[in-house]
Amino acid sequence: MADTVPRPAGGVESLAHRLHAHAPSHATHTIEMQQVIEINRYITAGVLLITAAEIGVDDLPRSAAAGASLRHLHIEGSPTFPYVFAVFELPGSGPDGHGVPLHTQHLQAISKALHLHHHWGL
């Protein structure tokens, strides 16, 4: 039986390499993933309009407009240490689909604005 897991230079395979050599199962759920799902539920329900300026995001790709409103969050990368991105929408236009990378302080500000008791960061 052939070994289908590519081995790094030197032929020694680390545990981290083995864990990230495949796509995660659709059943994979982490605290971060659950928190993003919960935030997206609140945002899509229209509970509160959150702007980029309110959470301290000032590096929007299309504009640094204070009126850019949060439309949803998405995760990329490993579920054990995901990158969280925010998609904002400028007034009078559609969502900017590229997404802006968020850091711990942005995620904490979003959770606080929505009165959610989330734990972000280490």
Image (spheres, rainbow, N blue to C red):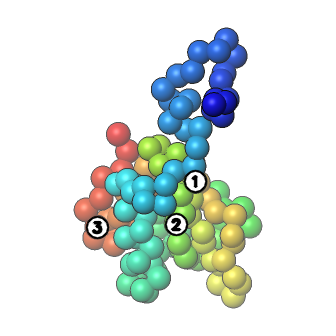
Where does label 3 land, which residue? 116
Q: Amino acid at mark 1?
A: Glu
Where does label 1 land, which residue? 76
Q: Nearer the viewer, mark 3 or mark 1?
A: 1
Identify the secondary structure beneath mark 3: loop
Where does label 2 land, which residue? 73
User: Looking at the image, is 45 positioned above or below residue 119?
Assistant: below
The answer to which of marks 3 and 2 sits earlier in the sequence is 2
Identify the residue at horizontal 59%, vertical 15% (top origin): 12
**Image marks 3 and 2: residues in contact by CB distance under 8 Å:** no
Asked which quadrant contains residue 100, the reply is bottom right
Residue 98: image x %, image y %?
Answer: 69, 64
Res 53 visible: no
Q: Where is the N terminus found, in terms of image quarters?
A: top right
Q: Where is the C terminus found, in terms of image quarters?
A: top left
Q: Amino acid at mark 3?
A: Leu
Q: Nearer the viewer, mark 2 or mark 1?
A: 1
Residue 96: image x %, image y %?
Answer: 69, 72
User: Looking at the image, is 53 positioned above or below residue 6?
Assistant: below
